[in-house]
Image (cartoon, rainbow, N blue to C red):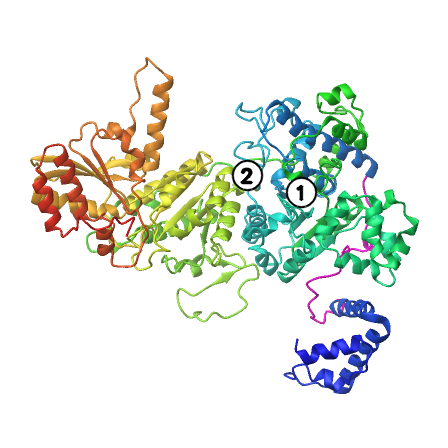
Amino acid sequence: MTQELERLINDTRNGERVEVGSLLSGFKQQLPDADPTETREWIEALDDVVRHGGRERADFLLRKVLKRARMLQLGLPGLVQSRYINTLSPEQEPPFPGDEDMELRIRRIIRWNAVVMVLRANHLFPGIGGHLSTYASAASLYEVGFNHFFHGKDADGASGDQIFFQGHAAPGIYARAFLEGRLSEGQLEHFRREVVRGEGLSSYPHPRLMPNFWEFPTVSMGLGPMTAIYQARFNRYLHARGIKDTSASRVWAFLGDGEMDEPEATGALALAGRENLDNLTFVVNCNLQRLDGPVRGNGKIIQELEAIFTGAGWNVIKVIWSRDWDPLLARDVDGALVEAMNETVDGEWQRYAVETGAYIREHFFGRDPRLLQMAEGLSDDQIRGLRRGGHDYNKVYAAYAAATSHRGQPTVILAKTVKGWTLGAGAEARNMTHQMKKLKIEELKKFRDLLELPISDRNLEASTFYHPGADSPEVRYMLERRKALGGSLPKRVVRAKALPQPEPKVFAEFAQGTGENQLVSTTMVFAKLLRNLLRDPAWGQRIVPIIPDEARTFGMEVLFREIGIYAAFGQKYDPVDSKLVLSYTEKTNGQLLEEGITEAGSMASFASAGTSYATHGEPMIPFYIFYSMFGFQRIGDFAWAFGDARGRGFMLGATAGRTTLNGEGLQHEDGHSPVLSSTVPCVRTYDPAFAYELATIIRDGLDRMYVKGEDIYYYLTLYNQDYSMPPMPSGVEDGILRGMYLYRAAVQQARHRAQIFGSGVAMLEALKAQEILAETYEVAADVWSVTSYQLLRDNALDCDRWNRLHPGEPARVPYVTRQLEQAQGPVVAVTDYMKSVPDMVARWVPRPFTPLGTDGFGRSDTRDALRRHFESDAAHIVVATLSALAADGRVTPGTVAQAIQEFGINPEALTPREA
């Protein structure tokens, strides 16, 4: 705003006459005015309103005009922020269809058991943790959904709704399942004590630990919102491709206002708005507190979130005030109450939540005589009892009804609550309430009395669970409501049937090799294999390729036209490359998910596709291919959650290796993804060197995950270096899958023996070193292809454990040890990753062991220069082998020194890690 325009507006506020022509001159004249006189009249009318009715009246009128303009479909966007009041006015609220008194009794029982579960756990085992306050604030938000909106899965083939429960609210969800008879008192007794299989309840939603109960892991905050958005989108994808009718499924995500600070929580909002995902509803529990204190003590988080969601194209419904405020707002003719609500920051609202009615009367209503007059008919207790909207069943029901009937946009419900609601003065709205695990006996008595539960003082001392009985009116009502909505939730059901084996021709060509004159990368091999799978009659329709805007980098742009890129509204334009064979082709039923530059979003799609076998009873096979540096390093938390969700699929780290993607430098060159992937227990990590290895591993993955139904997933490295692919030797398939096999034995006899382990593209340097050792140093070296150090290590650890727990029985020998029983000489292992990768198996190798790798930051140069820098090229393999032989007295130190000199290696150079 210019200073001149600001002055003119201020003059108008002060009641002075302003020349309209002067005012209009402050605006751009870029577009012609068809009727300047009419424009002047509108401006003059607004001036008069401000002069005679005040700013509040002008604000009211303008908002009314904007609303009318939208009703007339004039194309004017709405304001990104509305007043700090409920979006739905009382006359817009539908009648509540249930028995509110009955549902209040049910809600109170659940509140009690949720609290007692945490109290008992911490009484028996101090420090075991749990959360009292999150569910306490959100109970009404959940119960309205359970009783009236959430659709279950009990009908044949029904997907029901997908509900992402807020992780810290888990005790309340368990307490409801207990009333329904789905969980026993013994299980509640074992809250957070789940080592005894089948008895314990996990701390948060964990499908890995409770595979028949939870569907989606959500407690790693921020992952739930993004995953929910992509779940809603994947539902549309399945429907558009004719795989399953998901039109009756709605995705609900329950979130915290503090959680919305996570970048992932808001990172995909625009996608939901852009694709009109009206099958998606966010419910943000705005209790105004995060873990340590207020979310926005000096601001207003609900208003901030409203602006963010509105700007992203969402339908926003604010549930701020309960019905108790409706009479006051109805009398607010001058707008004084609304203005006070607008001006009060969250830190003050939190203070009001813990103060007396007299304090609120003085500090809130006392700021304006008109407000004091409004409050005259209210006692201090009544003022203290003015509730927030998220605790009003009618208001919440009206919001849910409006959300589920809205079309063309996703909806977010911003519900204002009090953290720790009903837990008493020591817990409600206190900054420390999130960390509270215990209540004093007097506080527990007050809690019981507030809930009006028939629990004796003796049982109170023991923190007894309360169940009114399986035939009680409360339980019958609950079960009737859930039956009408399709069964109890949450529930995870696996209905997917095993798929048949893919046709042999899918993999056959890769066993033949490419010949000496055809050079290809393993990325190119994968692209060809994927196309073969897409053409398989049983598997093709179930393949879900996922690429974060790098298809051309990976040589996969041929898929654009072959299978189409999924686009909710098709392709509304003629692409610039439409006349080319590999043109960018978007389709409403496209199969490829081209996600743009968002690894997190791509991983969320991976999660939706990889759990579809359970969520929808439709096994989908995601192949998520990405820049390997931006895989587990960037989205490691998503990868961990995918394992928790029992997801199935393939993650493929392309442009892999620290020396292979040679020109990209430090931020792009991956030398550690196998280390990171190995931290997820259900991942099978492979680093294949050759086409037949890659094909064998993928065939095994398809069999294990989609034929046998194992809840695992695969991480495979793919390289962009071209070389000749050899034919598959006979009898190596088992070794490929278990982690290693002898690829090329020493070509001739020699004075000395050695063993070289190679993986991925490092196999090329290993094979060069084998030739140099034989020709120059009389060392016969066997070369082993190690496809998975992780699996070798897992096997060795299993053997160690079995031996430790079975004394006196024949010891089991690790696979890696057994493979080397007849091998002679030291072992040198070379990888394009950190030395810690081959070090995974060092203690089970029965020979002197030297790892070579790429510790340190990447940099740009030629591949040869990089491998020399990281001391992982053929020359360093030779020197390492000779050094190990010298340590064993097989060759002289002079031989090693001579090799170092001949290869031009500088012994005094900084290590690659330091350089």
Question: Is disc 1 surrounded by few (<14), some (14 to 19) or many (20+) residues within 10 Å?
Answer: some
The foreground one among 506 and 161 is: 161
Q: Which mark is residue 824?
A: none
Q: Is residue 610 above or below residue 453?
A: below
Going by the image, does 616 lie left or right of 711?
right
The foreground one among 324 and 88 is: 324
How many angstroms separate mark 2 from mark 1 (CA)? 40 Å
Q: Is residue 78 magenta?
A: yes
Image location of residue 586, percent across then percent down: 50, 62
User: Toward which corner of the image does residue 421 lie, by quadrant?
Assistant: top right
Q: Which mark is residue 431?
A: 1
**Which residue is located at x 81 percent, y 52 percent?**
363
The foreground one among 75 and 111 is: 111
**Which residue is located at x 67 percent, y 55 percent?**
298
Q: Which one is closest to the eye, mark 2 or mark 1?
A: 1
Q: Is residue 284 above or below residue 127?
A: below
Question: Is disc 2 surrounded by few (<14), some (14 to 19) or many (20+) residues within 10 Å?
Answer: some
Q: Is residue 107 above or below residue 623?
A: above
Going by the image, does 561 lie left or right of 432?
left
Q: Find disc 2 in the rendering and name its residue.
A: 614
* Residue interval drawn in magenta: 71-98
Dot 2 falls on a residue whose secondary structure is: helix
Going by the image, does 213 lie left or right of 39?
left
Tag 2: amino acid: Ala
**Which residue is located at x 39 percent, y 48 percent?**
652
